[in-house]
Image (tube, rainbow, N blue to C red):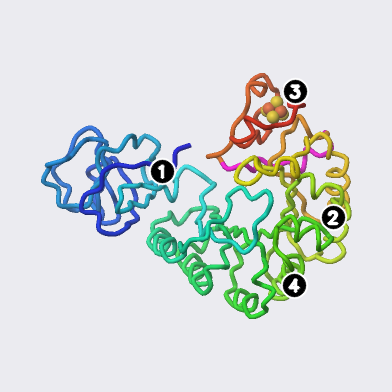
C-alpha cells in the first residue's frame, strides 16, 4: 500500500498537514483540494492544492504540488503532510484502524529483529511539529491510535506534550504506545506519566527472556533487561496499563516457557501478553541464521507458554501467526493483528476454508514463510 508520493512543489514554504478532499465545494482552511481532472475556480480558500496535472504557469497563489504520479491511494478525508520538496506522506487514513504516529526513528536499543531499524538523525522536532498539526484534524471517533518509533520516550518532554494533546483532542481514542520501557527505570518519568491519568493508554513493552544476558543480547543493549524490569515496576506502581510483547524467534524459544512463568510470578499486573510471529523486515533478513525458525517447530513451547499464562488468568494473544500452523487448541488466542497496509495472503490461502478467520502474513512473508502453510 502506498503511503508516500511526490510531485513538484510550488509556494510550499514549510511542511503543512492537511485533510484531502476531491470535492471543490468542501472549502476549509485545513483542507487540500485533490484536483486531478480539472482545476475549479474557487481555490483561494483551500490551504493547498494537489494535482497530477502539470500546473506550470497556472496563476495559483496557494501552496501546491503538481505533476504527482498518482493520488489514487488517497481517500476522502485522509490526512497528509506536504513537504517543501514535494513529498506527500500519508499520516492518517480514515478507512483504517491501523493508524499510528511515528514519534522518532531514534532508539536506545538495536534489536536483532527490529523491523524498522533506528536512524540516528534529529527528527523529533520535525515529527512533533507534524503531529501538533495532525492531531486536531483526526476524527474524534477514531477508535485506536498507535504511537511508535524508534523509541518514543526519546522525545523527552515532547513525549508528554504529545500525550497531553492526544488526551485533550481525542479523549475517546484508545492509545497504544510501543516502547522498550527502559526510560521508566527513572521513576520521575513513570510518576509523570501516572499523574497524567491516561486511562486509555496501553504501553506495549517487549521482554524477550527471563535471563538478563539473553534479553540484552537480543536487544543489543547492556543493562536493558534490568532497566525494562525496573521500568515495569515503576509503571505498575503508577497504575499504568501494560502489555508484554514477545517476538517468537530462535533466540527466545528455548526459554519461552520459563519466560511465561517469570511473567506470572514477577509481573502479574500486566494486562495482556502478546506472543508475536517474526516479521521479515528491517534487520531480520540480515540476521536470519540467528532468528529464523519455522513456526511449526516452536508450537510445543508456544502452546505450553500460552496455556500456562491463560490458566493463571492472564490475558494472552498470539499475533502474526497463520491458523494452518497453529494447533486447534491455540486458535482461540490467535488475532488478526497485521496492519492492513502490510497484510497479505499467499496463493495457498485462496482455497482455504478459514481464510476469513486467519490473519494471513506480512508482505515480507511472501518471500520467507513456513514450509508448512497449507489451505484448510
Ligand atoms: S492457508 Fe492461508 S488463509 Fe489458510 S490458514 Fe494458512 S495462512 Fe491462513
Q: Is residue 315 magenta?
A: no
Q: Determine whether label 4 and label 2 are within 8 Å by CB.
A: no
Whole-percent x, y for residue 349 in the image? 66, 24
Residue placed most toward the observer, 291 or 79 = 291
Percent coordinates x, y for residue 305 in the rendering: 85, 49
Q: Mark 1 points at which residue?
A: 4
Q: Which of marks 4 and 2 is in front?
A: 4
Question: Quadrant holding ligand 1?
Answer: top right
- 1 or 3: mark nearer the eye: 1
The residue to which callout 3 is attached is 376
| Residue 230: image tag | 4
Q: Which numbered disc flags the more N-terminal residue, 1 or 3? A: 1
Q: Which SS class for mark 4? A: helix
Which label sits in the foreground, 3 or 4? 4
Q: How far apart are marks 4 and 1 (CA)?
A: 39 Å
Residue at point 60% right, 58% down? 176
Circles 2 and 1: CB atoms closer than 8 Å: no
The residue at the point 67 percent across, 21 percent down is: 348
The local secondary structure at tag 1 comes to strand
Range shown magenta: 328-339
Separation of marks 3 and 4 at Cα, in angstroms: 45 Å
Label 1 with label 3: CB-CB less than 8 Å: no
Residue at x-position 56% and y-position 68%: 154
Asked whether, in this view, residue 293 is left or right of residue 341, the answer is right
Amino acid at each position: 500500500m502506498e503511503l508516500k508520493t511526490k510531485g513538484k512543489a510550488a509556494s510550499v514554504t514549510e511542511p503543512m498537514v492537511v485533510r484531502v478532499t476531491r470535492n471543490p465545494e468542501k472549502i476549509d482552511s485545513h483542507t487540500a483540494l485533490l484536483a486531478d481532472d480539472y482545476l475549479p475556480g474557487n481555490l483561494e480558500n483551500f490551504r493547498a492544492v494537489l494535482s497530477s496535472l502539470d500546473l506550470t504557469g497556472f496563476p495559483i497563489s496557494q501552496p501546491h504540488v503538481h505533476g504527482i504520479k498518482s493520488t489514487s491511494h488517497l481517500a476522502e478525508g485522509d490526512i497528509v503532510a506536504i513537504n517543501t520538496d514535494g513529498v506527500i506522506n500519508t499520516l492518517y487514513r480514515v478507512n483504517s484502524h491501523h493508524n499510528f504516529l511515528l514519534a522518532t526513528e531514534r532508539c536506545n536499543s538495536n534489536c536483532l529483529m527490529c523491523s524498522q531499524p533506528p536512524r540516528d538523525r534529529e527528527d523529533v522536532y520535525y515529527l512533533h511539529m507534524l503531529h501538533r498539526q495532525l492531531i486536531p484534524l483526526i476524527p474524534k471517533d477514531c477508535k485506536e491510535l498507535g504511537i511508535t518509533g524508534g523509541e518514543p520516550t526519546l522525545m523527552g518532554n515532547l513525549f508528554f506534550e504529545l500525550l497531553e494533546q492526544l488526551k485533550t483532542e481525542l479523549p475517546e481514542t484508545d492509545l497504544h504506545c510501543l516502547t522498550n520501557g527502559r526510560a521508566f527505570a527513572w521513576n520521575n518519568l513513570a510518576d509523570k506519566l501516572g499523574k497524567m491519568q491516561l486511562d486509555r493508554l496501553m504501553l506495549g513493552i517487549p521482554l524477550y527472556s527471563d535471563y538478563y544476558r539473553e534479553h540484552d543480547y537480543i536487544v543489543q543493549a547492556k543493562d536493558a533487561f534490568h532497566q525494562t524490569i525496573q521500568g515495569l515496576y515503576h509503571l505498575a506502581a503508577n497504575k499504568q496499563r501494560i502489555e508484554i510483547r514477545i517476538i517468537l524467534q530462535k533466540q527466545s524459544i528455548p526459554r519461552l516457557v520459563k519466560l511465561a512463568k517469570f511473567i506470572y510470578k514477577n509481573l502479574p499486573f500486566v494486562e495482556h501478553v502478546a506472543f508475536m510471529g517474526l516479521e521479515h523486515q528491517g534487520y531480520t533478513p540480515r540476521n536470519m541464521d540467528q532468528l529464523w525458525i519455522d513456526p511449526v517447530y516452536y508450537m510445543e513451547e508456544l502452546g505450553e507458554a500460552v496455556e500456562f499464562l491463560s490458566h493463571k488468568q492472564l490475558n494472552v494473544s498470539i499475533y502474526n501467526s497463520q491458523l494452518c500452523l497453529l494447533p486447534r487448541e491455540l486458535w482461540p488466542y490467535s488475532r488478526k493483528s497485521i496492519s492492513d497496509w502490510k497484510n497479505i495472503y499467499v496463493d495457498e490461502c485462496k482455497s482455504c476454508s478459514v481464510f476469513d478467520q486467519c490473519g494471513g502474513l506480512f508482505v515480507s512473508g511472501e518471500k520467507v514463510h513456513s514450509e508448512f502453510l497449507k489451505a484448510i
